[in-house]
Every structure is written in structure tokens, then in C-alpha cells.
């Protein structure tokens, strides 16, 4: 019986991932998100590792072919075959195609050969000091074949973890070659975040837009976002598409959207430069999940470095520094969890959101924070039980909304990260409970983008890639 149920679930998952595969990359959803998204690609690779490692590598490579010369990996890589009207804001709004490009010597996505470039490394030089592979130079990246364009903002760096997980499942020479190609690019991605984006100067990266967090309309951004004026005219000039495809009640509000457009336009009009951001940009926030995932990336890079001949020690040292900075800057002992820091005001957001639990994924998180985070997870605010997974926002908050996107619903990727965190801290029983709850949810409601926080009904896009992929990983 159990086997039959698992077979059905596996079959459904494969259908979703096959239907969302374009031939070069996987889209998050055919209906709502028709391009390639950055952290989606990483989560998707973790699931594909189990059934189609070749596709997992292609997904990661096609994303990194759009990496910018300064190391940033864009949050969306636009597909030239998709009409502009099918996603807003599209390439015309972002106006960034000239910056995207591929390393000159890189083979096409999916080929096994590593780039055989030479010359100095980019930015802070983790790769330069390593005896093995190094980051491609800016010139090499710039001289590559241009893609159709990308956005100029980023998303959480889950990719090193993705690459490591794919390799770990199939540790053959093909995988090692893919790691050799990816390693310097992953290092350049980390260098960009720890350099240009350390606006607060305390060792944590700032996001310049809520979209960079991946948790678009989370209450974690409400107080910082209040500083951004709502320019209604922006929404009159640009027509939203997301709330025509998705339900209006489930999507961010018009006021939120107007602010998103204003922030994106301001960053674009500053030519996507990160200099003097503190003096001119209205949204600069240190997100606990984003930074915890930077730490996780350094630990994954340490493992990758052992395969490709890099310097694992440097990565571990950086990971430890990120964990320390997170605890020093973003932890609040009164709430027993991490909070977003508004770099402009120096204040922590009072909102208790799922991104404040994600640092549990750091294996070197001190015992005190682990104990307190686990208690918060079990409290009525997040209520992890055998029938209820972890919602995106505090259930007891007055503005908790069980259907509105990142303001209440349950998301598979966040829960998957918490599941990993629980296991890495020896909380095996609770991890098993969470796993069972998540598998039941997907069996019952399908591979939806997110789930009603009270009923578990599937909402958002119906055939969503990261839900499918991470469920596959949970199945083991
Ligand atoms: C959502 O974000 C995009 C903007 O990037 C949107 O609302 O149009 C978020 O859930 C984000 O985390 C995700 O990467 C993206 C695609 O799945 O959709």
C-alpha cells in the first residue's frame, strides 16, 4: 500500500518536472513563471539529482551562463522564446541584457568539459589563493555569447548546496568536471555577496529588494518597505500579470507591487551599481535566511573544493564568520529567533517569519540558538506537529493570512531547509515528523506552489517545480 502510494507520488512528480523542462532549463511553473529563476534552479537540481543528474547539471549551468562579470547571479534569466507579455516585469523593464554573458571558454550547457581559462581571479580572491580552479575573469565572462537578458538583482545562493547534492548522488567523472566548471563561478557569486553587498559592514549581505529574499511579500519587510513611497502611476503605466494568472487575494497587494517596481527601477537607474547604496537606496535589509544560505554555500564549497583541488579551509572559516555575524546582528533572545535587520535604521523587524528560523540549517549554530529555535518551531506561533507543517508567518500574529503568498501559507522549500536543519542538529524525531507531514501534504494536495496554512489545500501555481523536486528528495 505504502509502496503504491509512493509510486503514484513519484510518477506525479516526474510529470511535473518533465512538463516544466524546456530542453535547457526547468521553469518554476508554465503558467506563472515562464523563465528560469535563480534559487528555484538550485532547489530543482536537488530533486533532479535523484532522477536525471544530467538535467540537474544543465539547469545549474544555464543559470551560471548568465552570471554577471561582477559575480552576481541574476534572479531571473529570461527565455528568448517567451513573449514579453507572459511575465512582468520582463527584459524591457530590467534593461540589463548587455551585462549577462557566458564565460568565453565554457562549452554549451550540459557539456562535460570544464572551462580551461587562465588569469587572475575576480574580487576578493578566494579562488585566486586556491591551487586549483579559479574564477573566470570579468573579461572572460563579458566576452561570452550574450543571453537574452536577465534581471540585475539576485536571490539566495543555494546553488553550491545544489551542485554538491547533485555530485554527492552521482560522484562520477562527469560530475567532477561539472564541479570544476561551476566552482570558480560559485566562488565569484559568494565574493560578490560578501563584498559589494556588505552594506552594513558587519559581515552580512544586504538585499536591495524584497524579491532578492525569495520571500517577496513577507511581513519581515513591512517596516523597511514603509520608507518606499507608493507611486500609483507606476502601476498605471505597467500592468501586473501575476494577479491575472493567480488569485488577487493570494498575491502581494497593489501597494506592495508599486513599491517593488519603484525599488527595481531605482536600482536599475543607478546602473545596478552597489557603491554608496547606504546614501541613496531606500531598501537595505539583512535577511537571516539569505545569510544563513550564504553560510551553507561556503560549507558546500568546502566539500566541492576537496573534489576540485580548491582550499576548503578558507570556505569553512568564512562559514564560521557568517554564523557569528548572524548571531551577533540578527538574533533576538526575547523572541527566540532571528529577525531581518533594516540597515538604514539599525532596527530589527518585529515580525516573526519563517526566514528567522532558517539559520537552523547551519550546522555550526551555537547550542543555545538551536534549542531556542526548536522551541519556537514547536510553539503555537509556528506549530510544527504531525498534521501541520511550518507556516511562513507567525500563526498568532493579527495579520497572519493563511492564503496570501509569503504572509502565512506553507512553502515546501522553507520546510525542506528546516528538515535539513533539524537533522543536522540531531533532532531526528522532529525531523521525521516534519518529513511525514510534508509528504502527506503533497500526496493530498499535489505539487502546488504553496499550501493553505490552515487546511493544507494546494494554492498558487498547480504544477510547481521546487515542490516536486524537494518532495523527491524527501522521499529519498
Ligand atoms: C516568486 O517571486 C517572483 C519574483 O521573483 C514573482 O512573484 O513573480 C517567489 O516565490 C520567489 O521565491 C520564486 O523564486 C519565484 C519563482 O518561483 O516566484
Image (spheres, helix red, strand yellow):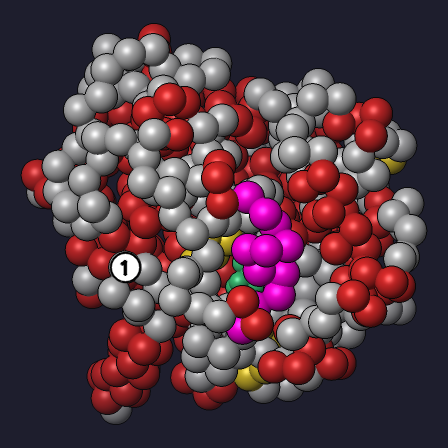
Spot occupied by residue 131 in the image (x, y as percentages of width and height): 24, 11
Spot occupied by residue 350 in the image (x, y as percentages of width and height): 85, 48
Q: Secondary structure at mark 1?
A: loop
| Quadrant occupied by the N terminus | bottom left
For ligand 1, the image quadrant comes to: bottom right
| Quadrant occupied by the C terminus | bottom left
Vertical placement of 158 versus 452: above or below?
Answer: above
Identify which residue, 42 or 444, lies in the foreground: 42
Q: Is residue 452 visible?
A: no
- The span shown in magenta is 86-96
Residue at image point 64% right, 73% down: 242
Looking at the image, residue 61 sits to the left or right of residue 436; the answer is: left
Q: Is residue 143 visible?
A: yes
Magenta stretch encompasses residue 92: yes
Magenta stretch encompasses residue 76: no
Residue at image point 68% right, 64% down: 406
Vertical placement of 215 versus 264: above or below?
Answer: below
Residue at image point 91% right, 51% down: 229
Residue occupied by mark 1: 24
For residue 186, which quarter of the picture? top left
Residue at image point 17% right, 33% down: 114
Mark 1, residues whose alpha carbon is within 10 Å: few (<14), some, or many (≥20)?
some
Identify which residue, 473 or 254, lies in the foreground: 254
Looking at the image, residue 168 sits to the left or right of residue 73; the answer is: left
Spot occupied by residue 371 in the image (x, y as percentages of width and height): 62, 43
Amino acid at each position: 500500500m505504502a509502496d503504491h502510494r509512493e509510486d503514484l507520488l513519484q510518477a506525479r512528480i516526474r510529470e511535473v518536472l518533465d512538463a516544466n523542462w524546456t530542453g535547457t532549463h526547468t521553469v518554476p511553473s508554465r503558467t506563472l513563471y515562464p523563465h528560469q529563476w535563480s534559487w528555484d534552479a538550485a532547489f530543482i537540481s536537488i530533486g533532479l539529482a535523484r532522477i536525471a543528474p544530467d538535467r540537474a547539471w544543465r539547469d545549474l549551468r544555464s543559470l551560471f551562463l548568465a552570471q554577471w562579470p561582477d559575480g552576481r547571479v541574476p534572479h531571473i534569466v529570461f527565455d528568448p522564446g517567451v513573449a514579453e507579455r507572459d511575465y512582468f516585469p520582463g527584459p524591457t523593464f530590467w534593461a540589463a541584457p548587455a551585462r549577462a554573458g557566458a564565460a568565453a571558454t565554457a562549452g554549451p550547457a550540459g557539456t562535460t568539459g570544464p572551462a580551461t581559462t587562465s588569469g587572475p581571479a575576480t574580487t576578493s580572491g578566494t579562488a585566486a589563493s586556491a591551487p586549483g580552479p579559479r574564477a573566470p575573469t570579468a573579461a572572460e565572462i563579458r566576452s561570452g555569447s550574450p543571453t537574452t537578458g536577465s534581471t540585475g538583482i539576485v536571490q539566495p545562493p543555494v546553488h553550491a548546496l545544489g551542485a554538491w547534492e547533485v555530485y554527492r548522488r552521482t560522484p562520477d567523472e562527469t560530475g567532477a568536471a561539472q564541479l570544476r566548471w561551476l566552482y570558480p563561478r560559485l566562488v565569484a557569486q559568494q565574493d560578490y555577496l560578501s563584498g559589494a553587498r556588505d552594506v552594513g559592514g558587519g559581515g552580512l549581505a544586504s538585499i536591495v529588494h524584497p524579491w532578492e529574499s525569495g520571500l517577496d511579500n513577507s511581513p519581515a519587510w513591512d517596516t523597511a518597505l514603509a520608507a518606499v513611497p507608493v507611486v500609483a502611476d507606476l502601476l498605471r503605466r505597467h500592468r501586473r500579470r501575476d494577479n491575472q494568472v493567480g488569485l488577487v487575494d493570494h498575491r502581494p497587494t497593489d501597494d506592495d507591487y508599486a513599491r517593488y517596481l519603484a525599488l527595481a527601477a531605482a536600482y536599475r537607474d543607478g546602473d545596478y551599481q552597489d557603491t554608496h547604496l547606504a546614501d541613496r537606496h531606500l531598501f537595505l535589509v539583512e535577511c537571516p535566511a539569505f545569510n544563513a544560505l550564504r553560510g551553507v554555500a561556503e560549507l558546500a564549497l568546502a566539500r566541492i573544493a576537496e573534489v576540485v583541488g580548491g582550499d576548503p579551509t578558507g570556505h569553512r572559516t568564512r562559514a564560521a564568520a557568517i554564523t557569528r555575524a548572524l548571531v551577533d546582528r540578527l538574533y533576538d533572545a526575547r523572541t527566540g529567533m532571528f529577525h531581518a535587520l533594516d540597515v538604514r535604521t539599525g532596527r530589527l523587524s518585529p515580525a516573526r517569519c519563517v526566514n528567522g528560523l532558517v539559520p537552523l540549517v547551519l550546522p555550526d549554530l551555537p547550542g543555545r540558538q538551536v534549542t531556542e529555535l526548536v522551541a519556537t518551531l514547536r510553539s503555537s506561533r509556528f506549530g510544527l506537529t504531525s498534521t501541520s507543517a511550518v507556516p511562513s508567518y507567525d500563526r498568532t500574529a493579527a495579520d497572519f493570512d493563511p492564503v496570501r503568498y509569503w504572509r502565512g501559507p506553507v512553502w515546501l522549500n522553507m520546510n525542506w531547509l528546516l528538515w535539513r536543519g533539524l537533522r543536522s542538529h540531531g533532532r531526528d524525531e522532529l525531523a521525521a515528523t516534519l518529513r511525514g507531514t510534508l509528504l502527506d501534504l503533497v500526496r493530498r494536495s499535489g505539487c502546488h506552489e504553496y499550501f493553505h496554512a490552515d487546511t493544507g489545500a494546494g494554492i498558487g501555481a498547480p504544477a510547481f517545480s521546487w515542490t516536486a523536486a524537494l518532495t523527491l528528495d524527501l522521499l529519498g
